[in-house]
Amino acid sequence: MKKLLIPLLAALSLAGCSSTERGAGIGAASGAVIGGVATGNVRGAAVGAAVGGVSGALIGNVADQPGRCYYRDRNGNRYVDRC
């Protein structure tokens, strides 16, 4: 029962969020898990959460804009333009 309750509460807490907020939350949580497992320490989990949160927010932001896509130019700069 406890294993079912925690994911259910997490899903309910994200229900009222925008796509950007939802993407940042999911990205941070999955980044923390992956970073913690890969390095085996808290520092790796913190770095994974930061990278995952930023990436998830960027992806979620583009999801709010239909007909727009996320691109990166040859210098590494990110921008959003028509698909």
Image (tube, rainbow, N blue to C red):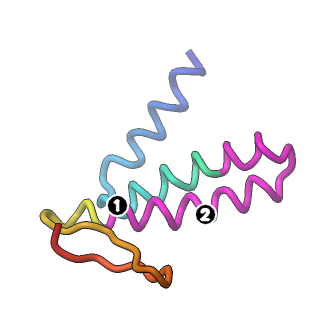
User: In screen coordinates, is 56 left or right of 15?
Assistant: right
The residue pinned by badge 1 equals 60
Who's the residue at 39% across and 62% down the image? 21
Under tag 1, what secondary structure? helix
Q: Amino acid at mark 2?
A: Val
- The image position of residue 71, as x and y in percent, is 34, 71
Question: Foreground residue, 15 or 74?
Answer: 74
Numbered label attached to residue 40: none
The residue pinned by badge 2 equals 51
Q: Quadrant of residue 20?
A: bottom left
**Eyeballing the image, is 29 above or below 75?**
above
What's the magenta bit mostly, secondary-structure-wise?
Answer: helix
- The image position of residue 59, as x and y in percent, is 37, 61
- Residue found farthest to the right: 41
Quadrant of the frame with the N terminus: top right
Pointers 2 and 1 in contact (C-beta within 8 Å): no
Earlier-in-chain disc, 2 versus 1? 2
User: In screen coordinates, is 49 left or right of 26?
Assistant: right
Q: Amino acid at mark 1?
A: Gly
Asked if residue 60 is among those painted magenta in the image, a careful observer would answer yes
Quadrant of the frame with the C terminus: bottom left
- Residue found farthest to the left: 67
- Residue found farthest to the top: 1
**Eyeballing the image, is 78 above or below 57?**
below
Structural crowding at the residue carrying mark 1, measured as other residues with C-alpha within 10 Å and reported as few (<14), some (14–19) or many (≥20): many
- The image position of residue 76, as x and y in percent, is 49, 79
Which segment did they paint magenta? 32-61
